[in-house]
Amino acid sequence: MKSLGINWFIEGSIDFEHKKYILLDYLQEINRHFDRSRLYPNLTDLIFHYNNLLDFKHNKSTLQQSFPHRMTQADIDAVKLTYEKIIQDDASMHEIESIISYALYKMNPAIQTGKEIYDFVESHLNIDPIGLVPLMPYNGYFSLRNGRERTNWVYEYQITIFENKDDKFRGINIQFVDTYEQSITTTPEFIKLDLINKHRHLPNPAVYYVASDISFPLEQTLLPVAKRSLVKYISKAA
């Protein structure tokens, strides 16, 4: 996957046409993946860059707060140095603002396309608990079936809860466990019993059967959407 540098729009030659070429080449690659229903890591990366541009546009003077997720101190220092060089140059600042406005305008439709694909995939997912669910369902397994494929991909999951001063967030960590070929005898209930017998560290796990009625790219689309959908499902039920 082609990628943009963290501060692609202010590093090197600050030239609108040059930056436009870089951006359109990147978006062409993103849309090529979206055309094949490959969401990740493309959608996450695109949203990251979109938010970075908004941060810079709305808060140019406080660069320490810009690019909060991926920047190291060295990155921040480099951006500050670049900013100090161009802040005195009105022509450069005008060019950067033009680049940012154009980039936001071009990125927005691609983000909307990615979100529509995400919503479409999620709408074709069904989540069912297998057997009784324990009172604390934050550790367990889920079995993932991709459309009409017979293979069930089984993952152990752990839902984590972390807070900031304003809100509480939930994340999920997963680890691949095994595959089962679904048949008359290899049912979701059989898979649950087999997991309990083989993996004693979770004697009474929550187990969910997650299935899509359409096949999607497993690693790039179905699995990431299934993870987020499972977190929402468990959070509502718990």
Image (tube, helix red, strand yellow):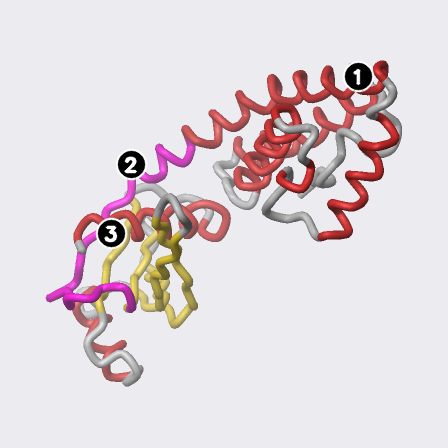
Q: Is residue 155 left or right of residue 130?
A: right
Helix, strand or loop under label 2: helix
- Name the residue that disc number 2 marks: 123
- Describe residue 183's horizontal placement relative to residue 51 as left or right: left
Which residue appears at 28% of the width and 85% of the height? Answer: 200
Q: Is residue 133 magenta?
A: yes
Q: Amino acid at mark 2?
A: Ser
Mark 1 lies on a secondary structure that is helix
> Where does the N terminus fall, quadrant-wise?
top right
How far apart are the two marked residues, 1 and 3, measured between alpha carbons?
A: 46 Å
Report the magenta residues as a range: 117-139
Residue in the image at 54% along x and 22% along y: 108
Q: Is residue 28 visible?
A: no
Element under label 3? helix
Camera-side residue: 155 or 20? Answer: 20
Q: Amino acid at mark 3?
A: Ser
Going 59% across and 47% down the picture, which residue do you hit?
69
State left or right for residue 69 relative to residue 234: right
Q: In the rendered structure, find residue 235 and report the number of the disc placed on it.
A: 3
Mark 3 or mark 2: whose residue is earlier in sequence? 2
Disc 2 or disc 1, which is closer to the eye? 1
| Residue furthest left as drawn | 132
Q: What number is the disc on residue 95?
A: 1
* C-alpha gap between disc 2 and disc 1: 42 Å
Magenta segment includes 68? no
Kind of residue at disc 1: Glu
From what the image shows, is residue 131 above or below residue 61? Answer: below
Do residues under tags 2 and 1 come within 8 Å of each other at their CB atoms?
no
Sequence-wise, the earlier of marks 2 and 1 is 1
Q: Position of residue 143 (x, y in %)?
A: 30, 61
